[in-house]
Image: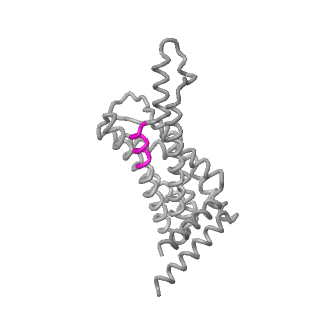
């Protein structure tokens, strides 16, 4: 029984990878990798109670992508793609770490009298540290699960016009706000609070202000996201996966009634 379940899930996942547009998948994976790398840099702000990191530059795009994937393919599919992106990110983090161990000099390290210092700093930045990788991975996975299922749940409240613009806006904005806050706060709590000495107030304000900043970024692409999901439905994008998912759900329901 377990073996059959694993085979079925793997088959579904393989079909999903074939059905998700390649450009969307590539950009999503790149955004996950980029936001984790940029999270190493804090933003200089005049107020000591406010703290942000550069991960907010691209993290909004990851949530934007998860929202359109959830809307069209469902929360399970969106989470599976998220886990794939996290896995790829961890592989490249390992490759960057190995690259930082290779003897040599970074091009930007050639500053008279500071070569070793700058080269070490660049190696540390691109090589990463275990707590930053762990914190960003845990935070993003937790926020992705919450974002995707809350997005799906809010969408279920719209019985008359679930595919309308109002339904898309509300399910996207509410779920993204929750997910972004969880992502920012979890990362700040795991990494910034314990390793960089941020106060809990800074963690909370970072999460809140980061959420607002990222929601403002996503606001620009709110209608394009709606247009993408509508176009996917009109063009039959992912039809093979959606049909397979419906068949599996029907079989599960039949087995449950036996």
Q: Would you say the magenta stretch is mainly helix, strand or loop?
A: helix
Q: Which residues are magenta?
A: 129-138
Q: Position of residue 92 (x, y in %)?
A: 54, 42
Tell me the residue at 57%/51% (across/down): 222
Q: Is residue 69 magenta?
A: no
Q: Position of residue 232 (x, y in %)?
A: 66, 61
- Horizontal placement of 230 versus 37: left or right? right
- Foreground of the two, 76 or 210: 76
Q: Position of residue 81 (x, y in %)?
A: 54, 56
- Horizontal placement of 197 versus 111: left or right? left
Going by the picture, which residue comes out furthest to the right? Answer: 235
From this view, report whether residue 36 is shown above or below residue 252. above
From this view, report whether residue 255 is shown above or below residue 211. below
Tell me the residue at 38%/40% (across/down): 206
- Horizontal placement of 88 versus 237: left or right? left
Q: Quadrant of residue 70?
A: bottom right
Going by the picture, which residue comes out furthest to the front? Answer: 103
Tell me the residue at 46%/25% (across/down): 120
Q: Position of residue 41 (x, y in %)?
A: 45, 32
């Amino acid at each position: 029984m377990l073996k059959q379940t694993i085979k079925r899930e793997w088959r579904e996942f393989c079909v999903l990878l074939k059905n998700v547009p390649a450009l969307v998948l590539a950009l999503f994976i790149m955004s996950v990798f980029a936001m984790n790398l940029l999270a190493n840099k804090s933003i200089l702000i005049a107020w000591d109670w406010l703290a942000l990191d550069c991960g907010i530059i691209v993290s909004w795009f990851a949530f934007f992508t998860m929202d359109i994937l959830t809307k069209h393919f469902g929360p399970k599919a969106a989470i599976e793609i998220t886990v794939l992106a996290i896995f790829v990110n961890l592989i490249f983090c390992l490759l960057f770490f190995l690259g930082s161990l290779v003897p040599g000099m970074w091009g930007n390290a050639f500053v008279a009298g500071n070569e070793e210092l700058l080269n070490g700093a660049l190696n540390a930045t691109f090589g990463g540290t275990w707590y930053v990788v762990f914190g960003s991975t845990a935070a993003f996975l937790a926020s992705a699960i919450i974002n995707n299922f809350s997005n799906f749940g809010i969408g279920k409240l719209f019985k008359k016009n679930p595919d309308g613009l109002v339904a898309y806006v509300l399910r996207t904005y509410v779920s993204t706000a929750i997910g972004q806050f969880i992502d920012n706060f979890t990362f700040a709590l795991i990494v910034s609070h314990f390793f960089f000495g941020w106060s809990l107030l800074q963690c909370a304000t970072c999460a809140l202000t980061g959420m607002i900043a990222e929601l403002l970024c996503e606001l620009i692409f709110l209608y394009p996201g709606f247009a993408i999901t509508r176009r996917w439905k009109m063009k039959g994008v992912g039809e093979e996966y959606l049909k397979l998912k419906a068949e599996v759900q029907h079989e599960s329901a039949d087995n449950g009634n036996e």
